[in-house]
Image (cartoon, rainbow, N blue to C red):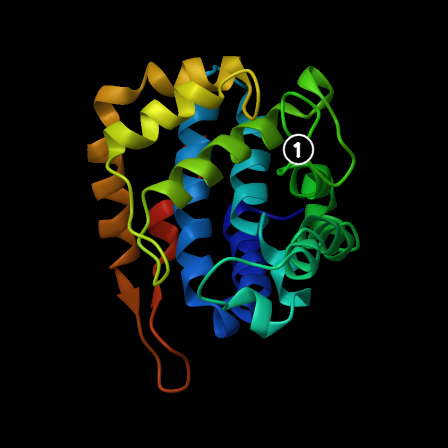
Amino acid sequence: MFDLITIHQLIDSVISILDARDPYTYEHSERVAYFSERIAIKMNLDSRSIALIHFAAHLHDIGKVGVPDYVLNKQGKLTNEEYNLMKSHPRIGYNIVKNIEVIKEISPLILYHHERWDGNGYPEGLKGNDIPLGARIIALVDSFDAMTSTRTYKNKMTVDEAFDELQRVSGTQLSPEVVDCFFSMRDEVENMLSDVNKKMNHYVFNDTEKARFNRSQILPVV
């Protein structure tokens, strides 16, 4: 009923709301979608699963529309109260997406992308393989991109430093299976990072909207 282009147009409409408040999160989500898709391919998942993971990765942070600006844009460490507000975003995102018929199937991946392998994550404290594989993939890439991105309140890690950290938290924060898969792609990562950033610089303009890159250049490879 809906083709990939139509679904991506819907996703664009949804995340444009978040982009208006926090352009970093928009760009972050593009990179998370790109790398999550490629990990899913490397793990030999079926084409439908790959597409669902790709879509969920685009929208994994959409719940941040419900987080107050003073928390979302704070430069510095969050207080406990602010951190609890930030931790509400997976549940908010889940509640948004579960009510959109064409993409509701990805809502659990959004809900669980901050769960930890050791059960100490949120919002439900799922552990190990009880966490959906797609959510485990997004969790790894979410962490990797956060570590290798520059924000006003932190310097970015090198790719080597980020891989060292991923290795350190494998089996505690992150799924060992997903970490091992990403490590098998290590030699490709710098080129992949350059590729996605170039694609995000391919913009389309009109008279009323801000620049937006041509999403048809970064559809799922399925």
Q: Quadrant of residue 160?
A: top left
Residue at 64% in and 56% down:
86
Q: Tell which residue pokes out farthest to the bottom in this image.
A: 207
Secondary structure type for disc 1 = loop
Measured as percent of width and height from the top left, residue 50 is found at 53, 29
Residue 42 visible in this rendered orientation of the protein: no
Residue that numbered label 1 is attached to:
115
Callout count: 1
Side (left or right) of 4 relative to 132: left
Residue 217 visible in this rendered orientation of the protein: yes
Q: Quadrant of residue 209?
A: bottom left
Side (left or right) of 185 relative to 47: left
Tell me the quadrant of the picture where the C terminus can be found. Answer: top left
Out of 86 and 64, give the one closest to the viewer: 86
Label 1 neighbourhood size at 10 Å, few (<14), some (14-19), many (20+)? Answer: many
Q: Quadrant of residue 64?
A: bottom right
Residue 133 vertical placement versus 89 (above, below): above
Measured as percent of width and height from the top left, residue 14 is found at 60, 63
Measured as percent of width and height from the top left, residue 90 is found at 68, 48
Residue 207 vertical placement versus 170 (above, below): below
Residue at 75% in and 50% down:
91
Residue at 44% in and 66% down:
75
Residue 192 vertical placement versus 14 (above, below): above
Side (left or right) of 55 relative to 180: right
Out of 16 and 123, give the one closest to the viewer: 123
Task: Give the residue type that dot 1 points to.
Answer: Glu
